[in-house]
Image (cartoon, helix red, strand yellow):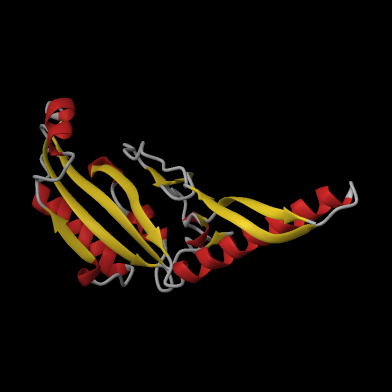
Amino acid sequence: MSVMPDEIELEIVLASPSGSKLKIEDIEKHFFEVLKTQKIPESAVSFISADNPYYWYYWWWDYRHYSNTRTYKLKLDCTKHTFAFIKDLNTDYIRSLRITSSTHSKITEYRKQVKIEAIRAAKQKASDLLESIGQSAGKVIEVIEIPESVNTNFWYSGYNIQNLTSNAIVSQPYDGEGTSGTEYIPTIKLRFEIKAKFEIL
């Protein structure tokens, strides 16, 4: 099942390159002005301190190129806002932008629906195969949920957006003319596998 998320959490790293005349405070000011223009409330933004898990990565890999960085978390309400704000950001001062999570208020219900369809499909498949030899599937004896695979390669630099649930990449919308921004929101892919044993009649 493909589900359009109603909430997406973004991690945005603002950076002032070494030698730049623009201070990090000015970069932050522009960032918040863009959000205000797009009517995204400041309450949706939270500051992540320098002791975040990627701090030492920045220091080791990019310390010669970025003298100062500020990391923010933005919770985007997809029922009200889109990724259209990205086109107004100055990408020269965006170190990275990535989706850290996406969800839906009814995600538990949707997961249940997919699991129900999986067990029904298993019963139907067993019945189809047994009918070919003149038998049928009876009551279920055992049902085992096969664990979901998890994408652990979650770090992405640059200006692509990665949805960890569906493994879908969305490019930054450089030209926002005539677009609403909804086409840049990746869907959540729900997929479940089960192993089932049925009585043979």
Q: As rendered, which of 60 and 196 lies closer to the eye?
A: 196
Residue 31, position in %: x, y?
A: 22, 57
Compared across the picture, whether 93 is left or right of 88 comes to left
Residue found 27% across the figure and 64% down from its top: 35
Residue 44: x %, y % from top left? 25, 68
Give the percent coordinates (x, y) of residue 48: 14, 53
Is residue 192 visible in this depiction of the protein? no
| Quarter of the figure with the N terminus | bottom right
Residue at 16%, 34% in the rendered image? 58
Image quadrant holding the C terminus, namely bottom right
Q: Answer with the quarter of the image where residue 56 lies.
A: top left
| Relative to 7, 147 lies left or right | right
Position of residue 49 measured from the top left corner of the image (x, y, whole percent) = 9, 51
Residue closer to the observer: 127 or 156: 127
- State the residue at coordinates (23%, 57%): 73
Reply above or below: 190 against 64: below
Residue at horizontal 36%, vertical 60%?
85
Residue 143 in sight from this viewpoint? yes
Q: Quadrant of residue 36?
A: bottom left
**Is 143 or 139 nearer to us in this picture?**
139
